[in-house]
Amino acid sequence: MKRFQYPVMLAAAEEGGWVVTCRDLPPLVTQGEDEQDALAQAADAMDEVFAAYMLDGVDFPEPSKARRRERLVAPPAETVAKAALYVAMREAGISKMQLAKQLGVDEKEVRRLLDPHYGSKLPRIAEAVSLLGQRLVIGLEPA
């Protein structure tokens, strides 16, 4: 199962607060006032990195195992669902136009399904993933 959680490192900033980086996603650099805020900012920054990767047609790296003092972070659930669709499409070698035809919709709707900044309905994303021979799985874990 493909997971979209990446280990991040929190380092104390000289001016106070915490700086967050992710060795698997080099563009991810952010900061927060305290640890909780830093992790929330990391999830938000990860959302933007995922959007950039999908818009640029970049493959998501496999998440590394968390090292000591690293914390696992994932972007918002809707972004994870869209990333799963993006990965499933790339693995199937199918274009947006081809998926649109299978879904019986305009290609513009598939572009929206892949746009992390556009609010899509989860059942529609799951339907698209299913057409590609995959199953969208949602989990629950302690915060």
Image: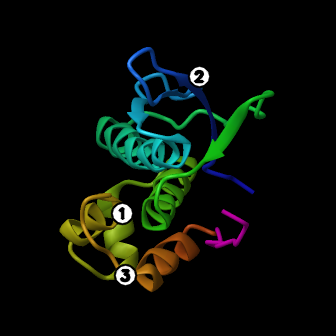
Q: Quadrant of the N terminus?
A: bottom right
Label disc, if present, on residue 23 of the rendered structure:
2
The kind of secondary structure the magenta stretch mainly shows is loop
Q: What residue is shown at x 69% (from left), y 71% (from top)?
A: 139
In this view, the residue farthest toward the front is 16
Q: Which residue is mark 3?
A: 121
Q: Nearer the viewer, residue 84 or 92?
A: 84
In the image, residue 128 lies at what x, y percent? 46, 74
Q: Hey, what amino acid is under mark 2?
A: Arg
Measured in 3D between alpha carbons, the distance from the residue under mark 1 to the one under mark 3, in whole angstroms, is 20 Å
Mark 1 or 2, which is nearer the eye?
2
Location of residue 132 in the rendering, given as x and y in whole percent from the top left corner: 56, 67
First to last magenta residue range: 134-143
Q: Amino acid at mark 3?
A: Lys
Report the Cα–Cα distance between label 2 and label 3. Answer: 32 Å
The residue labelled by disc 1 is 98
**Marks 1 and 2, Cα distance to the nearest angstrom?**
34 Å
Q: Is residue 127 magenta?
A: no
In the image, is 87 to the left or to the right of 138? left
Which of the 4 image quadrants contains residue 33? top left
Q: Residues within 10 Å of mark 3 (few under 14, many from 20)?
A: few
Q: Secondary structure at mark 3?
A: loop
